[in-house]
Structure formats: C-alpha cells, structure tokens
Image (cartoon, rainbow, N blue to C red):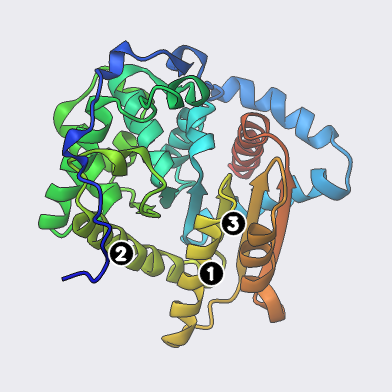
Amino acid sequence: MSIYSQKPIDLAGISTYPLDSRPSKVSVNDFARPLTDGEVSGVAALIDSLPRMLGADDLRSVARAIVAARAAKRAIIWGLGGHVIKTGLAPIVTDLAQRGFVTAVAMNGSGIIHDFEIALAGTTSEDVDEALGSGSFGMAEETGRLINEAIKRGAADQLGIGEAIGRTLAEISPKFAEYSLLHAAYKMRIPVTVHVTVGTDIVHLHPQADGAAIGEASHRDFRLFTSLVKGMSGGGVYLNVGSAVTLPEVFLKAVTVVRNMGDELRGLTTVNCDFLQHYRPLTNVVRRPVAGGAGRGYSLTGHHELMLPLLAAAVRSLRGKER
C-alpha cells in the first residue's frame, strides 16, 4: 500500500464527446499528393539546379544514401513526430514505402493519435487553446476508447502499439483509411514502432487507458526498433523528422544496445530534418551514433511540409536515373 495521503485520480468520471462533433484544424482535403512519374522528371531538373553547396548538397547526399540503402537491402527507418502526420505528409511517406524506400517507421504517441483520427474522421488537430478552458481538450470519445482498446488487445496478443493499432484499422476499415500511414504500413507488413511517454498523450486521460498494457506494448516496440536499427549496419539510413526529444533518445539507446551486443553498427547515414535544430536530435542522431568514422550525419533545416516532399522527389528522381 502507498504511504502517501493523496490518492491517484479516478478517470472513470471523465466526460467525452463524439469525434465528428469536434472542430479540427487539419483535413485530408489539404494533404500532400505524391508526384506522378511524369512530374518527377520536372522536379529532378529543379533539384539539379540547386547550388552545389551547404543544405542543397546535403539534400542530394541524403537522397543518394536512401537510394543506396535500398539497393544494398539495408534498413531505411523513418522516425516521425506527430507534426509530420498532421501537416498532411502521410501520403508522401506511404508512396515512398510502396517504392521500397521505407523499411520501418517509428512514431511517438502523438503520431498515432493524429493518424488514427485522420483514418476515422478525415480530420485531426483540435484547437487546444479553446478546448483547454472547458476541460474538453483531448476528450474525443472514439480516439481514447479505440486506441486504448487496440493497445490492450495488442498487449494481450504480444504485439507492439504500432502493429496493434494497424491491425485495428485494418479490421474496421474506416472511411479515410487511404490517408493513414499506420493502415498502409500494416497492409504492407512494414513495422511501425511507437514510443510512448506516459502522461503526454490525450489517450492517457481516458478511463480505458491501461498503464500496464501501454508500457508493455511500448517496451516491445522498443525492442523491435532495436532489432530494426541493427539492420542499418553496413549502409542503412535513419531519418528523424520532427521529434525533438523522444525519438532521438530512443534511437541513441537502440544504438547502444546493438553495439553492446557485439555489432559495431558502422556505415550509417543519420539525418535530422526539422524547422529548428534542437540539442537532442543534433547530438543523439546527427553526431554521436556516427562518431569515430561510423558514418555520416546530416541536418536538413526547413518546414516538414516543404522539405519532406522535396526529399521524396529527390529520391525518386535519383532512382529514375538508375534505371
């Protein structure tokens, strides 16, 4: 028994509302569209026209590393923060996955929430400032109930969070499933790992939340992620896109586990792509894992909704030249 006089709050009294009743700031109507093969050739000329220096050269180098990793059958892991999903970029990542340029995806908790809401309602991203005052922030009923049910059922079946939610989306086949990265990755059998910080995600506020199941499933995903990182040895690529803390920390720990167990993990390309370059991504992704000649790290600075489609176009244009 706890020695504290204060007891944990009982979430059974939480009030929720239907997801489709909530005003949202993001809609699938505004999502990015992958380029057609014909359009890629035009973008290739633009990429070739960029200066042969600094960020432009780094963009081309990262694209070449991704194409080379695909050819060498090495891991290409995309770590995605929630902002990447809610800026409408899931179709771009899905298109790259279908072309063999994504072997795994890592997300934080907000990423799965935005992706799940998009699949269900075609919208996501509530107005936090407006909802916080009334206590309704994060209280969409379907978001909390269905995600938590998927995690609990997944934990019982020895699945990680990413696979568990992908399975649920495949089962319920929601109206906007075509815009969901989780749904597409599950259908393609591409691993998605989810790395949760308990208390940071709105689904943890709901009475269906089960801390034991969340912890077990997220830890399973960490172990799966570490196995995936091992597949980077000898030419793999890790891209951290839009996660300032959680995914850089998880990546660094996975690297140390792999090296602790005897794999030198060399020949890596690591990339941080964000509109600000923060301490942890620069240290834990771009610098430390590739120190001592273990590989090369890059920082690509810019808004996700601009940089990721540009990088995807660069990858596809290079791939087209190889044929």
Horizontal and vertical percent position of residue 2: 21, 69
Tell me the residue at 52%/15% (across/down).
30
Q: Quadrant of the N terminus?
A: bottom left
Foreground tag (2 vs 3): 2
Q: Nearer the viewer, residue 62 or 37?
A: 62
Foreground tag (3 vs 1): 1
Q: Which residue is mark 3?
A: 68
Tell me the residue at 57%/53% (across/down).
239
Q: Amino acid at mark 1?
A: Leu
Label whose residue precedes the other's in the sequence (2 or 1): 2
Q: Which residue is mark 2?
A: 219
Q: Nearer the viewer, residue 35 or 229?
A: 229
Label whose residue precedes the other's in the sequence (3 or 1): 3
Question: Quarter-wise, where is residue 270 in the image?
Answer: bottom right
Q: Say what secondary structure mark 1 lies in.
A: helix
Q: Say what secondary structure mark 3 lies in.
A: helix
Horizontal and vertical percent position of residue 146: 19, 34
Q: Amino acid at mark 2?
A: His
The numbered disc on residue 252 is 1
User: Marks 2 and 1, Cα distance to the nearest angstrom?
Assistant: 15 Å
**Residue 7 in the image: above or below residue 55:** below
Horizontal and vertical percent position of residue 156: 10, 56
